[in-house]
Amino acid sequence: MELRRLRADEGLAYRAVRLRALETEPTAYGQTLAEALADPEQTWHDLAASVAGDDPQALFVVDRGAGDLAATLYAAIS
C-alpha cells in the first residue's frame, strides 16, 4: 500500500472511491450519493486535474497497487 497524491488521470478511480464512501458513510460528506452519481464524468476528471501536481490543495489516496484506490484524504498544504 502507498499513500500518494491523486494523479490528474485518475478522476474515474477517485469517483469509485467517493461513491463507496458515500454508500457506507452518507452523513460524513457534504454531498449525497445521488448528487455524486448525477455528476458528469468530466467533473471527476476536472477535480483530479485540479488537485494534482504542485497545487497547495491536495487529494491523497491510498493505492493498494495497480491503481486500486482504497481511501482519500483532502489537505491544504502550506
Image (cartoon, rainbow, N blue to C red):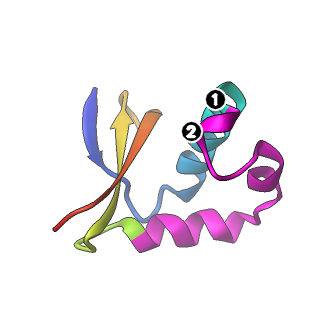
Q: Which residue is found at the position 28% from the left and 26% from the top?
A: 1
Q: In the image, is residue 38 part of the stretch drawn in magenta?
A: yes
Q: Which residue is mark 2?
A: 17
**Residue 6: image location, x then y, percent:** 37, 54
Pick whichever of labels 2 and 1 is earlier in the sequence: 2
Picture mark count: 2
In front of the other: 69 or 18: 18
Q: Relative to residue 6, is residue 1 depicted above or below?
A: above
Looking at the rendered structure, the kind of residue marked 2 is Val
Which element is circle 2 on? helix
Q: Amino acid at mark 1?
A: Glu
Residue, far left: 78
> Magenta segment, principal secondary structure?
helix
- Residue at x 32% of width, y 61% of height: 58
Q: Which residue is mark 1?
A: 25
How crowded is the residue under tag 2: few (<14 C-alpha within 10 Å), some, or many (20+)?
some
Magenta residue span: 26-50
Residue drawn at x 71%, y 64% is 41
Query: x, y percentage for residue 77?
Result: 21, 63
> Which one is nearer the viewer's eye here, 67 or 3?
3
Q: Are marks 2 and 1 in contact (CB under 8 Å)?
A: no
Residue 75, position in %: x, y? 31, 56
Asked whether residue 41 is drawn in magenta, I would say yes
